[in-house]
Image (cartoon, helix red, strand yellow):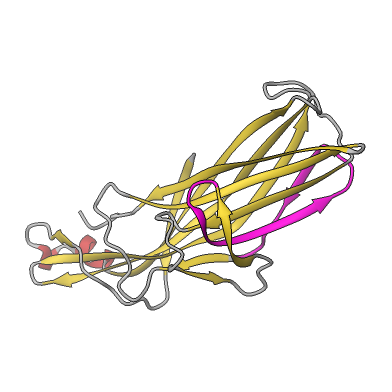
Amino acid sequence: MIRRGLAVAAGAVVAGAVLAPLPAHAGTDVGAASALGKKAFSYSYSEGYCFYSKPLKKAMKVRVSGKLRYVRNAYKFNRGIRVRFHDPTLVEPKLTLATATKCSGGRAAKVSKARILQLWYDWNCKSSVGVVLGRGSQFGVSLSGTRSCGRTKVASRSTGYGAGSGFVQHNTGAPVGWSWGRDGKGIKKGGKICVRGDAGATIWTGNRSDTVVKPLKVCVPASYKGLS
C-alpha cells in the first residue's frame, strides 16, 4: 500500500542519462525549471501477511512499514531533460508481530516468547550493489539466503522478546540504503522504484515453537512531478 509522497531538497548526486522531452517553450516554463536539479522524494509503505501455526494454534500477523526515500536528478540536456534516480533508502523501517487465535478477526493470543526478523536486499538480486548503513544503524550486512534471490547481500535485523501478544521493532532514522552509483538508474515515467525484503517470526508456547519467513516487496512511484 502506497500512501503520500513528499519532495524536499536533497544533497549532491551525480546524474546519468535518460531523456524526457521538454514541453513547448520550455525556456519560459517556470514550473519545469523549478523541478530541475536534485530533489528527494519519500513515500510511505505498508506490507504484511498472516500465517496460522497449526501445531501452536496461533495466528502470526507480520507487517513491515515505514518510508522509502530516493533522490531524483533532472537537468537540461540539448532540447530535453535528462532524469536519473539514486539511492533508495528505508526511513524508520518498522516490523510488527501480533499473535492471535486466527488470522481473520479473533482475539489476541499470548505466547511465551517471540523473535522477529526483517532483511532487505536489491530488487534485481545483485550482491554487487552497495548497502549503506546510516549512523547508529542496528542492521548488519552479510551474505545470506533469501526467499526471492537465493544467497545475496542483505541488511538484516533480528530482535527477541519475552511473553506477550504484540511485538514491535522500531528503527529510528534512515538505517539502510542502497548505492546506485554515480550514474543512478534511468526509470521511465510511470515506473517504480522497488526493494525486496523478507519478514519473519518465531514464536514459542512453552517448549514448542514454530517459524515463518515470507518475501515482501516494496514499490513506490518513480516521480516525474513537475517535469511534464
What span is colored magenta in the figure? 147-173
Observer able to see residue 66: yes
Question: Could you tell me residue 63's position as x and y percent?
Answer: 63, 41
Question: Could you tell me residue 123's position as x and y percent?
Answer: 43, 54
Residue 219 is left or right of residue 169, and the answer is left
Residue 115 is left or right of residue 74, and the answer is right
Image quadrant of residue 77?
bottom left
Q: Is residue 123 above or below residue 113?
A: below
Does the segment drawn in magenta span residue 156? yes
Residue drawn at x 86%, y 40% as measured from the top left: 164
Does the segment drawn in magenta span residue 199? no
207 or 198, which is in the foreground?
207
Image quadrant of residue 101?
top right
Question: Could you tell me residue 166's position as x and y percent?
Answer: 79, 40
Observer able to see residue 174: no
7 or 21, which is in the foreground?
21
Residue 68 is left or right of residue 173, and the answer is left
Question: Could you tell me residue 93's position as x and y percent?
Answer: 61, 55
Residue drawn at x 22%, y 67% as measured from the top left: 33
Residue 91 is left or right of residue 208, and the answer is left
